[in-house]
Image: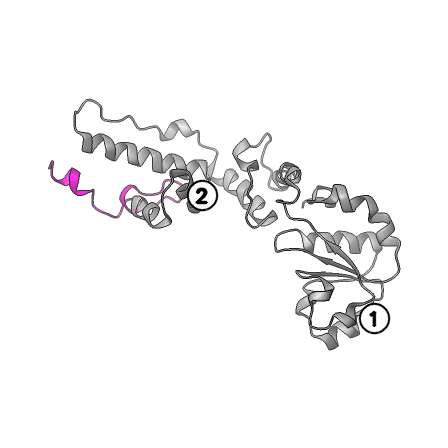
Amino acid sequence: MIPLEALPGFSSWGRHLQELLAQPGPIWVHGAPGTGVSLAIQELAHRRDTPLLDDADATSPTALATWLQQHPQGILGAHCAPEDTENPALLRTCIALRLWSLDEDPQALIPCLEAIAGELEVPLPLPAALGVLPCPGNLLEAHNRVLRWKLLGQAHEGSLAQHLPLETDSVAANLHALERLLLHRALRRSYGNRMEAARRMGISRRQLYLLIDRHGDPIRGSLPVAPPPKRLRKRE
């Protein structure tokens, strides 16, 4: 579990955390999906020794009003600010805390990755490629990156090396082998993320899937299903 102090933006809003917890009234924690709202409200509820309500913005106004009445010091989590809910007047007493995204606090990505690695029992240091922004999905994508590295990154890239058949002068044969090498290398360097592999290769997602059909995907263990290109079949 990522500690509260490692969340994006903690270096800013965390300086006022004790004052925030000491304030009377409920605390409404909100942020974009993947910014750690559920994690934050669990920790804040623990520190305040009070109940929590996740997905508060999806709770009906009647149920929310009852909950707030029963738990005037409660911690609520949502993906929108109190003023953006259906009944903002109901939440006038709430103190809003907005969580930052990784794009807003790039320095937080590495501590988050290291915390996730500890949880998944992945040894450090992690490859530098895992700590590159953008990180779509925020903490969820950060978790997926470390998990993919744990599951797929243990084999050395050198094990994928395939010598080009330079003993032949056939351009078609050499291009086919080079195409396979570049595809498999991009898939491994992106830790199985096909969108990222397509971006690395500078091709569309459709083109990537055509190449995977032709050469297979060593990360997912899929074998080639498409026939070789016409340029090779002409040589047979």
Q: Mark 1 highlights which residue?
A: 70
Crowd tier of the residue under label 1, counting other residues whose Cα lies within 10 Å: few below 14, some 14–19, many 20 or above: few
At label 2, the amino acid type is Glu
In-front residue for pair 216/65: 65
Q: Are marks 2 and 1 in contact (CB under 8 Å)?
A: no
Magenta segment includes 232 = yes
Residue 80 visible in the displayed image: yes
Q: Residue 196: x percent and y percent?
A: 45, 43
At label 1, the amino acid type is Gln
Question: Which of the numbered marks, if any, corresponds to residue 59?
Answer: none
In-front residue for pair 194/98: 98
The span picked out in magenta is: 213-236
Front: mark 2 or 1: 2
The Cα–Cα distance between marks 2 and 1, rounded to whole angstroms, is: 47 Å
| Image quadrant containing the C terminus | top left
| Earlier residue among tags 2 and 1 | 1
Residue in the image at 52% along x and 34% along y: 129
Q: Mark 2 highlights which residue?
A: 196
Q: Residue 73: x percent and y percent?
A: 84, 62
Q: Is residue 33 left or right of residue 211?
A: right
